[in-house]
Amino acid sequence: MPHPVLISDIQKFAVNDGPGFRTIVFLKGCSMRCAWCHNPETITPAADIYWKSRLCTQCGACLEACPTNAINPPMALNGSRDDESACHKIIRDRCDRCMACVEACRFDALTVVGKPMTVVDILDEVEKDRPFYDNSGGGMTLSGGEPGVHADFAAELLKTAAQRGIHSCLDTNGFYPWDVLEKLIEHADLVLFDVKHMDSARHREKTGVGNEKILNNLRRLSLTGKDIWVRIPVIPGFNESIEFHDRASEFLHNLPGKISRVDLLPFHNWCQDKYGWLGMDWPMKAIEAIEPSALEIPAERYRRRGFLTTVGGSGFEQSDGTIGA
């Protein structure tokens, strides 16, 4: 049995990451560095620390506890709690994540992000919601970060979920060797596969990696007979143009095998608090969220190619065959 890995969150009753009501398991660690990442707490595989300024009383207990002098002295409450404040409690480049500051904090202003869990720990938690899965066609979605960073663990988790009769989705960016992806999909009922850009240079500019391996993996994946939902995060200034959607829909149409549907996921900036809690600057925080209705025009590009296409990725289908929230 693989060693425990760090889980940033287990989110229940999700409806946009696979069919029915889902429990999403977020593994820490990712193979990309997407400029728009909505889950910055999952980027590194190590434990992180949130500092929530609105809960901080500036009592100084964390400063006294820190052995590496990685805590800024108490500040004025008005300044530190201001939405535009540049103040941050932790000096991140000195912090060794010993968590002494978290233990000293009495107000939950400092909290650990990343709980070690075994396969059994996770599935025991997931299985608590089995009645909701049975009634809605739901199950577990394995996400991140990127599950492929912990390939052996992720494969065992999906295998054990199948043994327990739990429907599972693998949510992946596809950026790893085919033999890794092949191992992960063996026991997954559904694969949620990201396509971010058709031009490799642009892809590398905003994610840190090229797209050749990803697109080749999708080609091979389409021949496996697996249920595949292609997910396209639509990002302002990156891939929102009709030209991109024309190229992407043509690529998907010309795959040698079948995909089941396409989900266009509109950019939002609701994750900016998490960047602040981690002491990270996020250049996209001032960019307005995309109104979902604005993606109906590009969605038609995929529908004309014969793909069931959603805006937002709802997992519930209405009696008329449309996708509803």
Image (cartoon, rainbow, N blue to C red):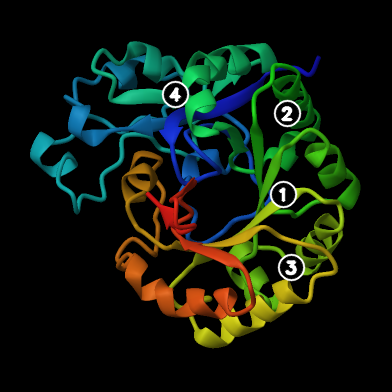
Q: Residue at x 68, y 43 (%)?
A: 190
Tell me the crowding category of disc 4: few under 14, some 14 to 19, or many 20 or more residues within 10 angstroms, Cα based: some
Label 3 packing within 10 angstroms: few (<14), some (14-19), many (20+): many
Give me the residue at 82% from left, 64% from top: 257
Which residue in the protein does label 3 denote?
Answer: 211
Q: Compare marks 3 and 2 and give the one earlier in the sequence.
A: 2
Query: Residue 43: x percent and y percent?
Result: 57, 44
| Residue at image point 86% right, 58% down | 223
> Circle 2: is it few (<14), some (14-19), or many (20+) Cα within 10 Å?
many
Name the amino acid, label 4. Answer: Val
Residue pointed to by mark 4: 112
Disc 1 marks which amino acid? Asp
Regarding mark 3 in the picture, which secondary structure is present there?
loop
Question: 281 or 255, which is in the foreground?
Answer: 255
The x and y percentages for residue 273 are 31, 45
Residue at 32% x, 64% y is 289
**Foreground tag (3 vs 2):** 2
Residue at the spot of label 2: 158
CB atoms at circles 2 and 1 under 8 Å apart?
no
Q: Nearer the viewer, mark 3 or mark 1?
A: 1
- Identify whether 125 is placed above or below 79: above
Pointers 3 and 4 in contact (C-beta within 8 Å):
no
Kind of residue at badge 3: Asn
Residue 227's label in the rendered image is 1
